[in-house]
Image: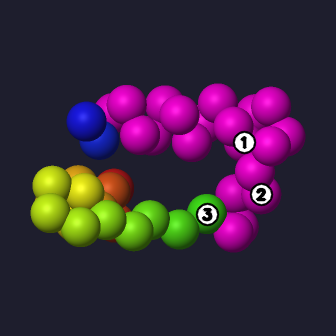
Amino acid sequence: DVKDVLTAIDHVVNKGYADPSKIFVLGGSHGGFLTSHLIGQ
């Protein structure tokens, strides 16, 4: 799951859809668990 999210982030940044300095993560339940893993990357 972490790899999928990181790949999606890279994709939207490379396409110019997102500013990498303004990306944040938020999640509840499994999303909260995933959020803690993403922050650790």
Residue occupied by mark 2: 19
Q: Badges 2 and 3: C-beta atoms under 8 Å apart?
A: yes
Q: Residue drawn 32% across and 57% down? A: 38
Q: Which residue is mark 3?
A: 23
23 in the magenta segment: no
Instruction: Locate residue 22 relative to residue 24 in the image: left or right.
Output: right
Residue 12 place in picture, x, y as percent = 69, 37
Please give the name of the residue rendered at 37% of the width and 31% of the height, measured from the top-left corner: 4
Asked if the residue under mark 1 is in contact with the one under mark 3, i.e. CB atoms within 8 Å, the reply is: yes
Give the farthest residue toward the front: 29
Q: Residues within 10 Å of mark 1 (few under 14, many from 20)?
A: some
Q: Secondary structure at mark 1?
A: helix
Magenta residues, start to end: 3-22
> Which residue is depicted at the point 25% across and 36% down?
1
Q: Amino acid at mark 1?
A: Val
Residue 37 can be seen in this image? no
Q: Are marks 1 and 2 in contact (CB under 8 Å)?
A: yes
Q: Mark 1 highlights which residue?
A: 13
Label 1 and label 2: CA atoms lie apart by 6 Å
